[in-house]
Image (tube, rainbow, N blue to C red):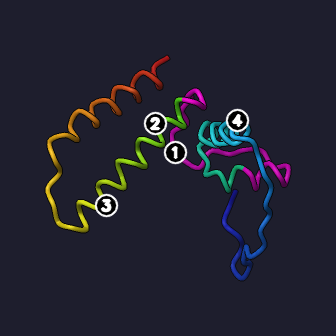
């Protein structure tokens, strides 16, 4: 969905609850459309067709996406703490990175 016109502000919110499976399905659809979750939900709510925003769409099982996302979040938290304390990355992270890359390759392969 396009940006609001000049002078328009998106200051209103819509909130609703989903099950985990519903949320994963919506996230996957948004990713396939190459859109952020907000843009995808806004377009769906307004009856607009989902339009790619330039990102490459990918297909992945929702459960795999969720697991890989959680690994990435954990890895990002480790990196932030190491950077905040100006510490070098420990050698133990190399196998974790390899595992994440392997999981991504398996999940994204046709």
Farthest residue, direction top:
110
Q: For residue 71, what is the image quadrant?
A: top left
- Looking at the image, tell me whether mark 4 or mark 2 is earlier in sequence order: 4
Query: Along the line of sight, which residue is nearer the eye, 50 or 87?
Result: 87
Label whose residue precedes the other's in the sequence (4 or 3): 4
Camera-nearest label, 4 or 1: 4
- The residue sitting at 51% across, 39% down in the picture is 56
Q: Which residue is mark 2?
A: 68
Element type at marker 4? helix
- In the image, what residue occupies the spot 70% across and 35% down? 21
Disc 4 versus disc 3: distance between alpha carbons? 30 Å
Q: Which residues are magenta?
A: 41-63
Residues under labels 2 and 3: Cα distance?
A: 18 Å
- Is 48 a magenta residue? yes
| Quarter of the rendering containing residue 5 | bottom right
- Find the distance from the CA under tag 4 to the CA under tag 2: 16 Å
Alpha carbon of mark 4 to alpha carbon of mark 1: how far?
A: 24 Å
**Picture mark count:** 4
Q: Nearer the viewer, residue 75 or 44?
A: 75
Residue at label 4? 21
Look at the image and tell me in which quarter the N terminus lies. bottom right
Q: Earlier in the sequence, mark 2 or mark 1?
A: 1
């Amino acid at each position: 969905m396009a940006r609001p016109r000049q002078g328009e502000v998106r200051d209103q919110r819509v909130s609703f609850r989903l099950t985990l499976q519903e949320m994963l399905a919506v996230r996957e659809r948004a990713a396939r459309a190459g859109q952020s979750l907000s843009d995808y939900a806004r377009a769906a709510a307004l009856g607009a067709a989902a339009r790619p925003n330039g990102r490459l769409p990918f297909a992945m099982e929702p459960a795999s996406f969720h697991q890989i996302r959680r690994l990435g979040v954990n890895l990002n938290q480790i990196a932030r703490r190491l950077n905040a304390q100006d510490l070098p990355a420990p050698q133990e992270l190399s196998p974790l990175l390899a595992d994440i890359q392997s999981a991504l390759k398996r999940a994204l392969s046709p």
